[in-house]
Image (spheres, grey):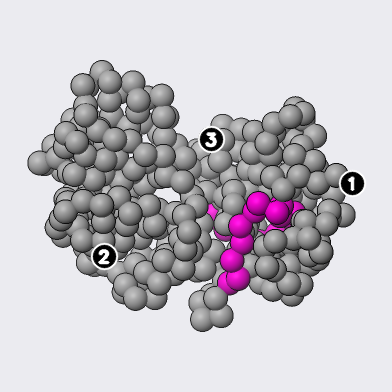
Amino acid sequence: MNSSPVGLHRVLEPPGVLPQAARRLDPDPRIREDEVRVRLERLNLDAASYRQLHTAHDGDPDAIRAEVLQIIRTRGKMHNPVTGSGGMLIGVVDEVGPRSPLGLTPGMRIATLVSLTLTPLHVEDDLRRWDGRGEQVPAEGHAILFARSIAAELPADLPAGLSLAVMDVCGAPALTHGVVAARTAPVVAVIGAAGKSGSLALAAARRAGAARTIGVVPFEAEAARLRAAGLADDVVIADARDPIALAGAVGAPADVTVVCVDVPGCEHGAILATAAGGTIVFFSMATSFSAAALGAEGLAADVTMLIGNGYAPGHAQMALDLLRTEPGVAKIFKERVEE
């Protein structure tokens, strides 16, 4: 059968759109010549999606599990219709088409570095091993990778769950490093700094030459966690959804602001907390990009706003290197993954 390197042949409806925009994909396990089939081990729901599901079902784990299963069965992929986001997965390569350019071989244990919102997915076990209480979802079934997909072999020196958690947010430190390195000793504020992407962004900002880093968290417990990790020069507490409170907590506006929170409504605070001529990187799937654009216009804010692309060359290795070499990052990740 005809095959498209970007997966057009897997789109069931509506016709003519890319897999990420599709309402439904075909997860047929029979692969084309340039595809790869992966045997599932674990899904990792992105933070914004899991928070939305948790809130919608008042934390009921059975209801959360049932909705995730329903989304996968209905859409042929994990694509939260409310947040528009998905996550990623780890698994074992099952079969590789002879024309696949991904460099994978059967038996290789990998993490996919593309979103579950565009990955054909079939679950066979009703997610019965998942307790519904966290973002990582043990699963049996299969996924399909296209010629334009991205995957990385899991490192042998790290637990699989830890590697999955790092690779899920590995775009954050890569882009943060690039933005910070392009400036001379900037002040960098990271909103949601005690989380996974936030801790990596802080470490990347320091490595790229930030003069000072500010970690913004919502609660004292998060502040204590971040202080113990030693990743930020200053730790401040503020509700990122309150623009005035956030800007007041940051103080003198930052040259670079990185938004890593998983709740909506943080766009205007990030704008107010950023200096004229500064840059804001939005790494949250809860971001409203229309609110960000119109908010900056309404505030007459001369800021550059970047959408956090989950891909950059070498992004997985950079994130894993930060985990291995920065004790504070390792501390936060181990606490998060164990929770």
Q: Say if the magenta span includes residue 142.
A: yes
The quarter of the displayed image where residue 16 is located? top right
Q: Does residue 224 show up?
A: no
Name the foreground residue: 223 vs 324.
324
Left or right of residue 133: residue 105: right
Specify the label residue 182 is tagged with.
Answer: none
- Could you tell me the amino acid type at mark 2? Arg
Q: Image point 26% across, 40% down: which residue?
A: 279
Q: Earlier in the sequence, mark 3 or mark 1?
A: 1
Is residue 120 inside the magenta stretch? Answer: no
Give the labeled residue for mark 3: 83
Q: Nearer the viewer, mark 2 or mark 1?
A: 1
Is label 1 in a helix, a strand or a loop? loop
Rate crowding at label 2 as few (under 14), some (14 to 19) or many (20 or more) other CA atoms within 10 Å: some
Report the residue at 70% width, 68% height from top.
104
Asked if 244 appears above or below 307 in the picture, the reply is above
Q: Residue at x 68, y 36 (%)?
A: 18
Quadrant in the rendering for residue 101: bottom right
Vertical arrangement, residue 97 with respect to residue 146, above or below? below
Q: Position of residue 114 (x, y in %)?
A: 59, 52
- Residue count near mark 3 (Cα–Cα under 10 Å), binned few <14, some 14–19, many ≥20: some
Which of discs 3 and 1 lies nearer the camera? The answer is 1
Q: Answer yes or no: is residue 109 visible.
A: yes
Q: Amino acid at mark 3?
A: Thr
197 sits to left or right of 12: left
Q: Circle 1 is placed at which residue position?
A: 1
The residues colored magenta run: 134-154
Please state which of the two labelled residues, at mark 2 or mark 3, is closer to the viewer. 2
Q: Amino acid at mark 1?
A: Met
Q: Earlier in the sequence, mark 2 or mark 3?
A: 3
